Image (cartoon, grey):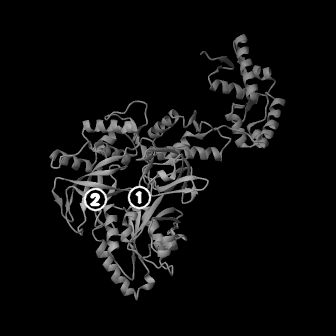
Amino acid sequence: MHVIGTAGHVDHGKSTLIAALTGTHPDRLKEEQRREMTIELGFGWLTLPNGEEIGIVDVPGHRDFIENMLSGIGGIDAALLVIAADEGVMPQTREHLAILDLLQIPAGIIVLTKTDLAPDPAWLDLVETDIRAAVSGTVMRDAPIVRVSAKTRTGLDSLLSTLESLLQQKPARLDLNRPRLPIDRVFSMSGFGTIVTGTLLDGHLALGDEVEIVPSGQRGRVRGLQTHKKKEERTVPGSRTAINISGVDTESIQRGEVVIHPKQYQPTRRVDARFRLLKDVSSALKHNSEVKFFVGASETIAILRLLGAEELNPGEEGWVQLELRDPVVTVRGDRYILRRPSPSETLGGGVIVDHQPKGRHKRFDKKILQSLESLIQGTPADVLFEAALALHIASVKEIVARSRLEAENAETALKELLEAGSLMPLEEDAPAIGSDLLVIALPHWNALQGKTLQIVEAYHQNYPLRRGIPREELKSRLKLSPQAFNAVIRRLLADHRLTDHSTLLAQPEHEIAFDSSQQARVRVLMRKFEQNPFSPPSVKECEAEVGAELLNALIELNELITVSLDVIFRRHDYDLMVDRIEKEIRQRGSLTLAETRTLFDTSRKYAQALLEHLDAIGFTMRDGDFRRLRKK
C-alpha cells in the first residue's frame, strides 16, 4: 500500500486536482471552502488502473501554512509537485521542492495543471523548460512531467497510469514489527469516541492491540481500524490509517504524538544529526541558534549546537546536536526539517544519526565527529541486518560474510539483532557467527509466515474434508529449498502455528467435520460394511457411494483402513481380523491363505490383500505358503 502527497504553490490547483482524481474535495473546513485555499491537511484516496488503492495527503501551499504542510509530507512514498501552467515556478514551488529534496522523498511526478489556461503549446514547452531548470540537482530531477486540466479532465488518465508505473517500481515498506503512527489528525466521532489518523510506519497494528501514545504516555486499546474508510482487522506499513482508540480522551492527544506498542520507543529531548543548509537562505547559521524542528508529524523548538564548526554558510553541510524543548519520538534514519522561527524561513534539513545520544557533546571533539561519521554509514547491527535482508533465508556464516564485518563487531551485532528480535533463528541451537544455522530477518519472516499460513488456510477452505496440505505441495508453492522449508516448518510447529500429521500439515484448530448430507451418505456406506464385514464394498464402490473426497476423509479419520488398491475394511472389522490372525498363528504356529479365507468366510481376494498388507507393515512374514508372526 502506498501514500502520495501534493506539493506546490498556493492556488496552483492541488486540491482541485485531487477532487478531480478522487471525486471528493480534500478541503473539509468551512474556512478553507470560503477562502478557496487549503489551510489544514486534506486526505483522500483513489484506485489506480491496476486496482491498487493509494492514500493521498493534500497539503497547504500558502507560505503562512508551510508548517501544516510539514506535518503531513514526511510519510509519503511519492510526491505530486503541482505547478500551474499559467504561472510556472513560484516561491512556494521552490520551498516545497527544497523540502521534498531534504526529506529525500523517493519518487515523484511533476503535474503541470491548468493547461486549459495556456495560450498555446509553445507556452507549455517554455514552462517545462523552466521547471527542468528548477528541479535539476534535486530528487525531482528525473521526474516525468504530465500535463493535465482538472477543469476539462484532459491528462488525468495519463497521470494515473504514470503514477501506477512509478509506484510499481517502489517495493512495499518493510514490517519491522515496531509500529509507529505519527498522529496528524485527532477527532471524535459519535458512538465511537477518539479517532487518530496518520501514516503507519515500521510495523502493523491489529484490532485489540494495546497501544501507547507518546510522549504523553497514555495507554489505550485499538477498538477499530480503517484504511480508506474500509474496516480492517490489521493494517500494514505505509498505509493511511485511522485508529479508534478506547480509553483515551480526544482532548488529551496532540498532533505530532505517536501511537506505538507499549515500551517499544522512548521519547528523546536530544538528537545528533547530519544537516544541510539550503543555498538560498538569507544568512549563515550560527551555533546556539533557536530553530523549529519538524520530524514525523511533530514540531518543537530546539537549540542547534554546531559540531566541528563555528557557523554554516548557505549550501554547506555539517554535524549538529539539537536540544529539544519538547520530547519527540524519532529513530535513526528519520528525515527532518529545520525552520527559522522569525522571520519564518525554511533553513534546511537532513537525517537523524543518533536518536538517543548519551550526553551533550564537546563541539570540537575529534572522536565524537569520527563516531558520527561512522554512524551515518550504519552501526554494525545495521550493516548485518541489511545483509540479512538481502539474503532472505541464509546461514549466519553467509550473512556475516556478506556484511564484511570483523568478527568482534559481527558477534556483537548478531547478539544485538537476536535480542531485539530483528533476526529470527530457524534452528533450535543458538546461532554463532561461524555457524551454518539458518536465520531470517524479521520482515521476511513476517511475510513468509503470513504466506505459509495463508496457503494452509486456503487449502482447508478448498478441501475441508482433508486433514491437511501435503508437505511437498506446500514446499513447492513456497519455492523454498528443502533445508529452508524444513527449518521454517520446524519453527512454525514449535510456535504452535501448524500441526504435523506425518506427510500433511494443518492449522491446529482444523478438524474434519461432515454436514448432515455427508453424514447420511456415510451411514448408508457403513451399513454395507456391516452387512459384509469381511467381504466389504471395493474402493471403487465406496467412491461411487460417497465420492472420493468423503472416502478419503473417512480414511484420514481412521474410520476405514485401506489394505490394497481395491480392498478396504472398516476399522472395527480390521482390528478384529488382525487380532484373530495373531491368535490363530500363536496357537497353530502358522497360517495359510486358504486357512485365512476359511477363518473369515471370505474370498481369496480379501484374504490375500489382508495378508500381504500385514506382511508389508511388518506384522507377519511369509514363509513359503505359510504366514508366521514377525519377531519384534
Decide if residue 141 is in sight here.
no
Tell me: residue 123, above or below residue 396: below
C-alpha gap between disc 1 and disc 2? 22 Å
Residue 211: x and y in percent read 48, 45
**Mark 1, secondary structure of its residue:** loop
Q: Nearer the viewer, mark 1 or mark 2?
A: 2
Is residue 80 toward the left or the right of residue 556 in the image? left
Is residue 314 toward the left or the right of residue 11 in the image? left
- Tag of residue 24: none
Between 631 and 78, the one nearer to me in the picture: 78
Identify residue type, mark 2. Val
Between 251 and 422, the one nearer to me in the picture: 251
Mark 2 neighbour density, 10 Å: few (under 14) some (14–19) many (20 or more)? many
Determine the residue positioned at 43% across, 85% down.
117
Location of residue 570 (image quadrant): top right
Residue 53: x and y in percent read 52, 62
Tell me: residue 332, above or below residue 163: above
Q: Earlier in the sequence, mark 1 or mark 2?
A: 1
* Residue at which label 2 appears: 291
- Tag of residue 75: 1
Determine the residue positioned at 81% across, 36% down.
523
Tell me: residue 510, above or below residue 302: above
Is residue 233 toward the left or the right of residue 124 in the image? right
Between 257 and 430, the one nearer to me in the picture: 257
